[in-house]
Image (cartoon, helix red, strand yellow):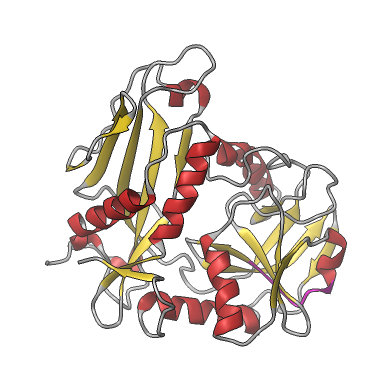
Amino acid sequence: MEKKNIDWANLGFGYIQTDYRFVSNYKNGAWDDGIITEDANVVISECAGVLQYAQTIFEGMKAYTTADGRIVTFRPDLNGERMEQSAARLEMPVFPKDKFVEAVIKTIKANEAYVPPYGSGATLYIRPYMFGSNPVIGVKPASEYQFRVFTTPVGPYFKGGVKPLTIRVCDFDRAAPNGTGHIKAGLNYAMSLHAIVDAHNQGYDENMYLDAATRTKVEETGGANFLFVTKDGKVVTPKSNSILPSITRRSLVQVAKEYLGLEAEEREVYLDEVKDFAECGLCGTAAVISPVGKIVDHGKEICLPSGMTEMGPVTKKLYDTLTGIQMGTIKAPEGWVVEVK
């Protein structure tokens, strides 16, 4: 298929409408088969559950062109599993994992002309999401839902090169211990909007959220998990029941162990030990790893030895290995890379 006439190298990280999207509706206790449609508009009641009580969940993933010209996506089964968990927590009907993967593949295939070429630095971002669609005025779950998948080509997250971030320890709480921090619900991201705008206004790139119960342990940022590297090269990721189980983070931990021979552990990470780490990064779909150079705790600066000019050496190896797996230049573990045929 001939690619769209897009300046791939100069794409930003924003929304560009593509030709097709997948839509499935839940009514009378069952999902329909779903369709691929050209209609990008969502038409719902003014009293729809999603508008009244924020009953909405989503996922974020990408499709790539590999070095040998195949179009692939990365671990879609895990996104499907996480969406099942999110739906259950918000009393929404589960859209089955196998149907989820099928819908994602169909949508990528339909928009094949928008998948950027290998080497451009750009990718096709995929957004599966679900929301309560029927009128709900009393506080209760909706009875009808819509599941959709759209795509948009996006540019490289690090446009012009990697620049380590400066983040602050945040006074706002992102999620309660028994709340919804562990699922990918829109409401969690709404909670972080004021805090991130405030951080930007204060000159910081991101927030470091602490656990709401004791405010002594590192949790995550508004949209990414933390990954630390000790001075002796061990990879450490925070453990908490109120942070999102990042697919990128889980993949990086496996890469650390199986590809790089590093020790890796998931455990509680206390704020007062952050100063002792050699490297810090933020893990997520968009950038894979965003390096952190400085953490500011109410005026007290914690400067990571890896510095403010480039990724630390271990973080760089992790980044290069995982992106190599995604782009097909490094052999992937079984099932990680799914070809769009």
Q: Is residue 298 magenta?
A: no
Q: Nearer the viewer, residue 189 or 10?
A: 189
Q: Position of residue 331 (x, y in %)?
A: 40, 84
Q: Position of residue 290 (x, y in %)?
A: 58, 67
State which quadrant residue 326 falls in: bottom left
Residue for point 77% across, 50% down: 210
Q: Is residue 210 above or below residue 92?
A: below
Residue found at the far front of this picture: 29
Residue for point 83% across, 59% down: 271
Q: Position of residue 153 (x, y in %)?
A: 31, 58
Number of numbered labels in the structure image? 0
Classify the position of the N terminus by image quarter.
bottom left
Residue found at the far left of this picture: 1
Residue found at the far bottom of this picture: 261
| Residue range (magenta) | 276-281
Residue 242 in view: yes
State which quadrant residue 195 falls in: top right
State which quadrant residue 276 falls in: bottom right
Q: Nearer the viewer, residue 262 or 169?
A: 262
Q: Is residue 305 above or below residue 52?
A: below
Q: Position of residue 282 (x, y in %)?
A: 62, 64
Classify the position of the C terminus by image quarter.
bottom left
- Side of 129 relative to 262 (left or right): left
Q: Is residue 190 above or below residue 318?
A: above
